[in-house]
Amino acid sequence: MSLLIHNILDFARNRLGGGIELNMSDEAVLETEVRQVVNELRAANTDREIQLDISLQGTVRCDGPRVGQLLSNLLGNALTYGDPEHPIFVNLNTIDEGAFELGVRNAGAPIPPSAMERLFDPFMRSTNHGDQMGLGLGLYIASEIAKAHGGKLEVSSNDDWTTFTLVVPPGGIDGQTDSGQGETAIGGT
């Protein structure tokens, strides 16, 4: 419920031009945040297997709680739309000095090509699943969090796997790798 409320508030702020607020930090909170999100969703979905692989080298600059929100949205979708007979894979790794990648991969029916074009639009919901929870804001908010970090959220889907991957460049939004903290709002339409 808390995630749904945060998504609605983020959507409203973004639409009103406030953008997604970030509190950028180099502190080692990202790994802790990712583990917490995975553990919470494991506890809430004891009948599902979620595998986690973390391989971070050095520090990365990001807003850890916002990346956790993004992961919660992606993992929630994987739990909803993925094949319950197969595990969900979450990976977090460094791809360059200060750059990182976060991925969520699940088995299940592929995302139709017609839906891929609008997948990150607000209120976009799947019509091939009986679940009527949510407002269709999760992937939109996730993509806005990625953009606010100067990164991108990519998706690939075929008969075997659907994979969402967040790629954040070194230094996040400003390309700086200093260890300072700062709050910023990015985005808005």
Image: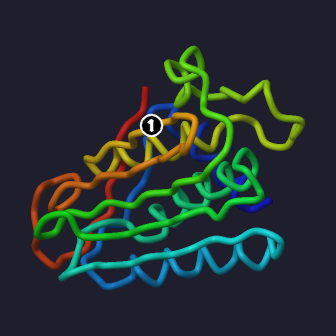
- Location of residue 159 with respect to 72 vertically, above or below: above
- State the quadrant of the N terminus: bottom right
Which residue in the rendered view is the most extreme toward the top?
A: 114
Left of 44 or right of it: where is 58? left
Q: Position of residue 155 (x, y in %)?
A: 44, 38
Q: In percent of the image, x 67 and y 36: which residue is there?
A: 109
Task: Residue 98: name its quadrant.
Answer: bottom left
Q: Position of residue 47 (x, y in %)?
A: 83, 71
Task: List the residue tagged with mark 1.
Answer: 156
Q: Position of residue 21 (x, y in %)?
A: 42, 54
Q: Nearer the viewer, residue 62 or 158?
A: 158
Q: Position of residue 158 (x, y in %)?
A: 52, 34
- Location of residue 56 with respect to 87 vertically, above or below: below
Q: Nearer the viewer, residue 158 or 73?
A: 158
Q: In percent of the image, x 52 and y 31: which residue is there?
A: 120
Q: In percent of the image, x 68 and y 60: which residue is there?
A: 86
- State the quadrant of the C terminus: top left
Q: Nearer the viewer, residue 88 or 72?
A: 88
- Location of residue 118 with respect to 43 vertically, above or below: above
Q: Amino acid at mark 1?
A: Ser
